[in-house]
Image: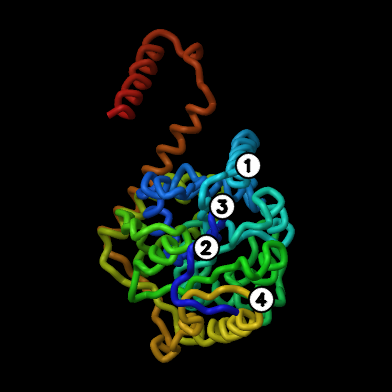
Amino acid sequence: MRSVDMPEALPDGSRFLHIGMPKTGTTALQGAIKEARKELAAYGVHDVSRRRHEMKTVLAAVGTLPSYLPARERAEWEANWHRMAAEFRSSEARCTFWSSESLSQATRDRVQYLADNLGSDTHIVLTLRPLAPLLVSQWQEVLRRRGTETLEEWAEKHFASVRPDGKVMASWDRVMPHIHRFSIRRVIDEFGRVFGEDRIILVMGDSKDRLRNFRVFESLMGVPEILRSPELDNASLPYPEAEMLRHFNRAYTDRGGDHATWMFTVGELARRGLRELTTMATPYPIRGPRWIAERANEYTADWIEAVRDSDVTVVGDLHSLLTDPDEWDEKVEVPTTVSVETAGRLMDVGFAAALEYGERRRAEAGTGLDQYGGRELLREVGRRAKRRVSRRG
């Protein structure tokens, strides 16, 4: 292990992947990079992403595209992945990079696939934070994907799926258990085996300095301080609203609702509305009980040993990944009430998403006008014209 406070710039011609972890300031970092794209290019730095986060392109790369996506759409994302891979691999920029937390979903076989397509001399950068708050944040994200378990139920299941030493005790079809994904030991083993441990850079987060990740990435790229905090609304739902969403997910699931429809509506179309809701609701941070912090520290202690025995570079204090359990309440009461205003707004968000989804389905079906006659034809033409005007407005 090599420990530094701030990394040196990567050699000219270097390429690196920022693979997450999720909930470690990745959204803010990607937003800052997007806004500074022209400035970075002036310093010879090339970002192969076209959007802030090429999520579905990355899911194609790591083999976890949702099965419910239409075959045509899946083929488009696969083609986009191969285009971006070729651009990354052949780039002649002074520094080339790609940032996506979804890259950390890559399994052992898929890590080799990434190296084959991107180049095995690629550097791997990992931003980190303590495991316990990371799990709490991730549970809230799982609710946005139709999660139905309470925080403690969900945490118990994932602790049981993987041992601290990395032995996996569960199987999965598409996406690996979260703690296995978060395992620094796994990253060193699987990415280090293919790319080389000496090309892995672990960046410790600093909750007191939100700009530290920006400074670290500027240093790696060899550019001055040009990354600035973007205007983003990526806050987590308050605990009562998160619990309301969980109960909605459970009710939808209990009555046989399918996952694809939920993801197309609440998971995608309602995303902006849910984010806006967080700015209106009364703040109520989601906290886990002390046992989650204690269990998380058991895993982290093992990962720290794996880091020490490796050839990776650590930026910052490795022990900052441990959490003080005394700062966590022994027991946390789960909220059972939510304001009527928030409940009403949440219903409106869901209803609006359902209406838009129905509209898109009708458009995709390509319903023609030949089925209408007389006055009904005129009414339908009027309705369609009104919809087009409203979209333009």
Q: Amino acid at mark 2?
A: Gly
The secondary element bearing badge 3 is classed as loop
Q: How is the image coloured?
A: rainbow
Residue on which the image places disc 2: 20
- Considering the image in quadrants, where does the C terminus appear? top left
Q: Earlier in the sequence, mark 2 or mark 3?
A: 3
Q: How far is the residue under mark 1 from the one under mark 4?
A: 35 Å
State which mark lies toward you, 2 or 1.
Answer: 1
Percent position (x, y) of residue 351?
38, 45
Residue on which the image places disc 1: 86
Which quadrant holds residue 306?
bottom right
Please name the residue shown 62% across and 57% down the image.
Answer: 122
Please name the residue shown 50% across and 72% down the image.
Answer: 135
State which mark lies toward you, 1 or 3.
Answer: 3
Q: Which mark identifies residue 162?
A: 4
Q: Amino acid at mark 1?
A: Ala
Q: How far is the residue under mark 2 from the one under mark 1?
A: 22 Å
Q: How far is the residue under mark 2 from the one under mark 4?
A: 20 Å
Please name the residue shown 72% across and 57% down the image.
Answer: 112
Label 4: how many Cα within 10 Å (few below 14, some 14–19, many 20+): many
Percent position (x, y) of residue 373?
44, 10
The secondary element bearing badge 1 is classed as helix
Q: How far is the residue under mark 4 from the one under mark 3?
A: 38 Å
**Left or right of 187: which side holds 52?**
left
Please name the residue shown 53% across and 85% down the image.
Answer: 297
